[in-house]
Amino acid sequence: MAAGDGEPVLQSKSVCVVGGGMAGLAAARELRREGHAVTVMERSGDVGGQWLYDPRTDAEDPLGAAVPVRVPSSIYACLRLITPREAMGFSDFQFLPRDGPGRDPRRFPAHRELHCYLRDFCNAFGLMDAVRLNTRVLRVALAPTSTTTTRQWAVRSVRRLGCTEDDEAQEEEEVFDAVVVATGHYSQPMLPRDIEGMGEWRRRQLHSHSYRTPEPFRGETVVVVGCGDSGKDIALDLCRVAREVHLASSSGVATPAVSRMLANHGDVLRLHPRIRRLHADGHVEFVDGSSVAADTVIYCTGYTYSFPFLDTGGAVTVSDSGYVVGPLFEHVFPPSLAPSLSFVGVPRKVPVPWFFEVQARWVAQVLSGRRALPAEEEMLRSVEEHLRAREAAGVPRKLTHNIGGVEREKVYEFGEKYSDLAPLEE
């Protein structure tokens, strides 16, 4: 109700949040704070999203070609944070070291510590009663009762009643006033398109999504494709057990980090330019003409945006080889379906969870009526202008959602424009 003259009458909506990871939990907390009725649907057996380590992999699909992947987590056992814990806490619930079995007090802790922290966050704000675990969303589509002025969404889900994939499942369909998609973008593997012979190579190939520990590769010659964070991590992990590790970089030039790796593990580790072809006899040929006989190739080549459950009739699509979700006004609202459909967690290279909090608070306040969105035409025009400006600046389309890595100042401008959340400290 209104608190005084001129203030909006705030509305309470029923909202389904798809995904119980960091972005989904940020959304759930902000939606509840604004007075909305929230249901979080999480396909795994606990909250945490990517930070819930799962030792399983899909042995029948190690490249992760199926959509959606059977095992959502991509965390490998040796993973540690590369951002200090001081910068990875919610604005009002800092990521402080805690005592207890299995806790990790280091400034750059292992992945399990962040999962424990997200559980602590849920407990501190009473979010677990809103979360349905072991619940996979099958389809999200406009409900038949929807109109252009009053949209509702039909959400069909299946809930596993036991702890394994083979247990009995219960399917149901519910209608919500709004849906927030917060499924992240580190589950569906992206495979290289410029390597010849991948389909004919008969030795082992997998995406880093299916990598957990180095032991299965003991004594092998392994080629690791990609020099990003996961590529470097996995190459170092393999150096402990593999006979040889060959790191293939798109540039073939050693960064300072890779130079240190080569200095410390030069007896096992080699650097190469990108791969040209995989040969049927097991040889991996690089673009400089060199080659190596390998047992395994591991693709550390990133992930694509994927929302196989989302049916918008073409209003929201994933394009440009999986790099672009759109159209999205400020990476959050599809203009033709806003505000009843929104996305939290699409941008890359942003400080988390702070940026997720900003997005989630904006969504929650737009749904309640505390804040208003521009007209649909204006939002669409803003999206188009953003894309044209980036193109004119020479920014590749695949970096459309890369905010912090391209326009760092935009991260903080976004916070100031759409939220009353305190800015991050330097």
Image (tube, grey):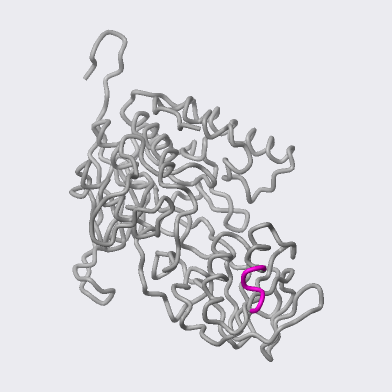
Residue 209 percent across, percent down from the top left:
48, 68
Residue 175 percent across, percent down from the top left:
26, 47
Location of the N terminus by quadrant is: top left
The quarter holding residue 180 reads top left
Front residue (pair 141, 115): 115
Front residue (pair 175, 260): 260
Question: Is 297 situated left or right of 144 in this image?
Answer: right
Residue placed furthest toward the bottom: 281
Above or below — where is 278 with respect to 402? below
Residue 153 percent across, percent down from the top left:
33, 45
Above or below — where is 172 with respect to 291? above
Residue placed furthest toward the front: 264
Question: Is 240 situated left or right of 263 in this image?
Answer: left
Residue placed furthest toward the top: 5
The quarter holding residue 271 reads bottom right
Front residue (pair 96, 48): 96
| Magenta residue span | 263-267
Mostly what secondary structure, the magenta segment?
helix
Q: Residue at x 28, y 74 (%)?
A: 165
Q: Residue at x 18, y 48 (%)?
A: 129
Residue placed furthest toward the right: 289
The quarter holding residue 254 reads bottom right
Q: Residue at x 68, y 70 (%)?
A: 248
Front residue (pair 377, 8): 8
Residue 277 percent across, percent down from the top left:
72, 78
41 in the magenta segment = no
